[in-house]
Image (cartoon, helix red, strand yellow):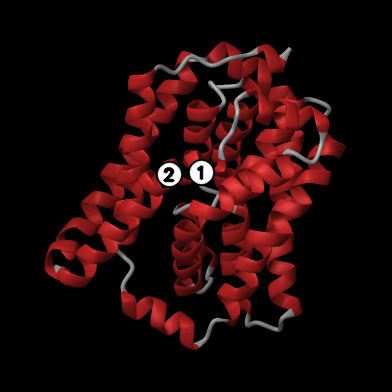
Amino acid sequence: MIDDLVLQFDTRSLAVLNGALALVMFGVALDLTVGDLKRLAADPRGPAVGLLCQFVVLPALAWPLAMLTTDTPSVALGLILVAACPGGNMSNVLTQLAGGRVSVSVGMTAVSTLAATVTTPFHLALWGGMHPSTAALVQEVALDPRQVMVAVAFVLALPCTLGMATAHYAPKVAARLRAPMRWLSLLFFAVVVVGAIVANRGAFGEALGSVFVPVAILHATALGLGYGAARLARLPEPDRRAVGIEVSIQNTALGLALVFTFFDGLGGMAAVAAWWGLWHLVAGGAVAWWWSRR
């Protein structure tokens, strides 16, 4: 049974995963400046629509979808966790490929990442406690939103702040670091995650059948939600594409870190986060390629 699966990930591996995530976020923040945030503030329609979808609507939709698509508590809680995570940095790359407005994507990633210090633990506690089966898992690990907030602050808020500070006060240093940091940090993170999957390949193989359909449905819902809301708001097509991709690309690295930190590597949750990390690149990349041809 998938709920009986507990993935092997020791304290040292967790520290390396958190370090890799912090390194990735530092690299992403090197592309952000105070000027970027000011320009977004001057015309905030795109980010505002997208962040409303990401912060409010998607987590609210994840709960009923989780209840409808799976009867496994750890998978349901994994879907809620992923929906509560901020946007992932690969959304910026996919937005560029899709012909979307990259500044909207980057701005949403920055704001959602900084806000995740509060929003991720809030939604995990709120929606995870809405059903007895998932509430039992939350209570079983004595999840304290303040502890999650501190963990998120160290792996997201702190490196993002340092990256933006470097871009602002040492622009020449940031310019030299951007390209190598982008690839080295992603490579480092990929090695850590792939290593964890390989070490637990039996458990992941057993869990895939239980998470494939729920992840695909929630991802498609997130993509349609972002694009549809931007269209209803009468945003231009590049903004619609940026918002659609941003809402559907989640920072599953953070999700995995939280699963291993607070849920002892619970199989269903870890499988959802890990598979989403692969699926949103495959499905999101296919949509981005299709848009690029239009």
Residue 76 visible in the current orientation: yes
Asked if the residue under mark 2 is in contact with the one under mark 1, i.e. CB atoms within 8 Å, the reply is: yes
Residue at position x 53%, y 21% from top? 264
Q: Position of residue 78 (x, y in %)?
A: 66, 34
Distance between the alpha carbons at the discs numbered 1 and 2? 6 Å
Residue in view at x 58 percent, y 11 percent: 202
Q: Which residue is mark 1?
A: 146
SS at badge 2: helix
| The quarter of the displayed image where residue 244 is located | bottom right
Q: Residues within 10 Å of mark 2 (few under 14, many from 20)?
A: some
Of the 4 image quadrants, the one containing the N terminus is top right
Q: Would you place residue 67 above or below residue 61 in this image? A: above
Task: Give the residue type that dot 2 points to.
Answer: Val
Q: Is residue 293 visible?
A: no
* Mark 1, secondary structure of its residue: helix
Residue shown at 54% from the left, 39% from the top: 277
